[in-house]
Amino acid sequence: MDFPSDTAKSSEYAALKAFLNDESSLEETVDNFISTPDSSSTEDKLLRSWDALGLTASQTPADSPSQEKLVSFLTALRQRDTNVGDVEGKTVSWSTLPLFGRQIREHWNYDERAAQKDAETARSWANANAFAARVTATASAFDSSDPLDFSLYAIWALRAALEDKDDVPEATVAAAAMWILFAGEVLRKQSKEQRSYEGKVAQAGNKYPNKEWNGFEMDRWRSWNNRFANISEVSPYKEIKDIAKKTKRHMGDLANC
């Protein structure tokens, strides 16, 4: 994920970092985050704010308690009815997280080659997916209008790692595993209920040309389970074998959900 070079210099980024470093309370962090000390337009303020959150999440280790702190921050922000200003002719408040989903999508890009060559790029991608998964786990189930529902991103990550080809980079597998580890219960429930999407955005990967998947379903869930099991046995990389084993084990724990 790429963010503007000045994102780390913003007051919003500083507020989040202070929170993660236990230098400010949750309430103080929300106050500092939503304040507008300059004459920024509403849209500029929002985009700068979401960039700061996205960058912070991508820098925060996937298994760190700080990731949960960021989720708690978003939850607290949703409880603020403070108006931000006008967006596309409508007055919006922080509680609706205006432009959040759009801005995250704007930066949701993955350079597989770069991740293979650069460990920091690989870690950032895993961190970002872990955060999106944690956020999705708090969203209203099956409500595509919920700004915290990134379930479709789970399909993209799992498809890239498990459905497109056999020789998959470590970073791609690690990112997919984050969705099972941190949002597995929600994803399995959606699979049982066969949540689908319009068009081809959630279609099967290249390895499954005869599958008519267009979202979540148990047949697809089982194929993911089998692929993680296979990777845990044949991958030449210990770290990936370990995370695949952990993910497969977690999928087994979710069998009764």
Image (cartoon, helix red, strand yellow):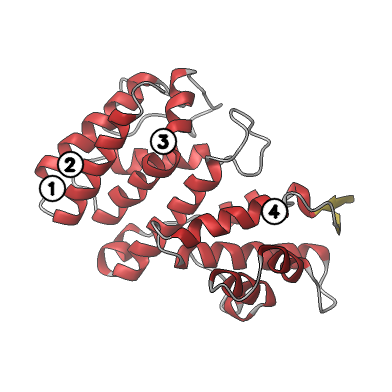
* Residues at discs 1 and 2 in contact (Cβ within 8 Å): yes
Q: CA distance from mark 1 to mark 4?
A: 41 Å
The quarter of the image holding the C terminus is top left
Amino acid on which disc 3 is placed: Gly
Q: Is residue 188 above or below residue 104?
A: above
Residue topped by disc 4: 76
Q: Amino acid at mark 2?
A: Ile
Asked if the residue under mark 4 is in contact with the one under mark 2, i.e. CB atoms within 8 Å, the reply is: no
Q: Which residue is mark 1?
A: 235
> Which numbered tag is attached to residue 184?
3
**Where's residue 241, x and y in %?**
17, 48
Q: Residue 168 at what x, y percent from top left?
A: 23, 48
- SS at mark 1? loop
Asked if the residue at tag 4 contacts the one at tag 1, i.e. Cβ–Cβ closer than 8 Å, the answer is no
Q: Nearer the viewer, mark 1 or mark 3?
A: 3
Query: Measuring 36% from the left and 50% from the top, which residue is drawn there?
Result: 175
Check disc 2 and report the residue beneath it.
231
Q: Which mark is residue 162?
A: none
* Discs 4/3, front: 4
Asked whether the residues under the numbered discs 3 and 2 touch, taking CB atoms below 8 Å apart as contact, a structural biologist would say no
Name the N-terminal-most of marks 1 and 3: 3
- Residue 70 percent coordinates (x, y): 57, 59
**Which mark is first along the chain, 3 or 4?**
4
Residue depicted at x 34% and y 43%? 160
Give the answer, above or below, for where 103 lies relative to 221: below
